[in-house]
Image: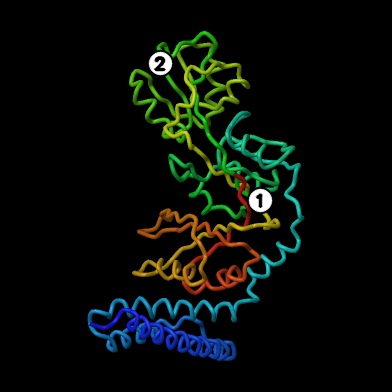
Amino acid sequence: MADLTEIRTRIDAIDTQICELFAQRMQCTHEVAEYKRESGKPILDRGRERAKLADVATKVPEKLRDYSQVLFSLIMEISRCEQSAELNHESELAGDIRTAIGGTPALFPQDAFVACQGVEGAYSQLAADRLFKRAKISYFDSWEGVFRAVDEGFCSYGVLPVENSTAGTVNQVYDLMMRHNFHIVRSVRLKVDHNVLALPGAKLDGIKDIYSHQQAIAQSKGFLEKHPEITVHVCENTAAAAKMVAESGRADVAALSSRSCAALYNLVALARNVQDSDANYTRFACISKGLEIYPGADRTSLMVVTPNEPGSLYKVLARFYALDVNLLKLESRPIPNSDFDFMFYFDIDCSVAAPEFPKLIASLDDVCEEYRYLGSYTELV
């Protein structure tokens, strides 16, 4: 039996050769990029890659064929990524991002006209107050209204919930993202507490109906299951539920809402912190119409549509892996009026100042049917 140290020495020698050959191969990649620049040929040559992978499989033992194809698929992804960075460094998107970085003020605005869904006391309003010191808030009945207010210039910014640590993604907001042009300029994580609020003098055992938003109801499932005698009603907003209870004059109705709404609408808490998890946070995105990238931006959001074929999502993920870019979130949503086509949402952890960032932005076009850059920003915690 061979000595382990001797085996590892041989492995190290082989790895050195692999590194040297990899460097030589990447030099050829640069030469290919120059040729394609001069000839106008596209970066992706599916026929060539397909033939290459088939050839590789014939040059290794059968039990290694699948592994060899994975290895060479990644090498070719790295090669295409480098070619894209060289050929597309002056793309329109790269120019827009560079202009935004140079033209955005050094400080996030303190005063702003902001659109929120709901009424005074809504969690969106609390998030807006975390983002801006002196926000002038306009309230809208729907999240669609918030998008329109920003798109039409009625408000400079909009604040929208995008996901909750307990109930997950706010699907309606993600679906609206497909239909509107916007950019994310900042995000904030807000601790959410749900309380059973009612008029002074009301008792919990006398409550017949509870009103709240669907997300709050989902986040308080455990409490509601312990009270099957209470009928749960969905309404547009937790603050709107509190306001309705305050105006009802009834002692048998309550709202699932925040403690701030208790003070705002002169209600009392019959039960506090009824959410299923004490670590209950909701992420809110602050959107604008124009592209603004403030100093320190280290999180980027993307929307991607991939071809409906095997391995298409892997090719996108391989770009992140090849550039050592951390993926914070991956969400899929079906595209309306299409069969089995999905839009993928990515949140990535990468500073706009990192050398990997422009390479990634330049490299995604050739592996996506559609690709939207939603913005780069920091998240307040």
Which of 220 and 175 lies nearest the eye of the viewer?
Answer: 220
In the shown orientation, is residue 7 left or right of residue 324?
left
- Please say if 106 is above or below 264: below
How far is mark 1 from mark 2, CA to CA?
A: 42 Å
Quadrant into which the C terminus falls: top right
From the viewer's perspective, is residue 98 above or below residue 217?
below
**Which residue is pictured at 74% across the width and 47% down the height?**
109
Label placed on residue 288: 1
Dividing the picture into quadrants, the one containing residue 137 is top right
Res 11 → quadrant: bottom left
The residue tagged 2 is 208
> Relative to the observer, which residue lies in front, 350 or 98?
350
Q: How is the image coloured?
A: rainbow
Q: Earlier in the sequence, mark 1 or mark 2?
A: 2
Identified by mark 2, the residue type is Lys
Left or right: 84, with 151 as reference point: left
Q: Nearer the viewer, residue 179 or 246?
A: 246
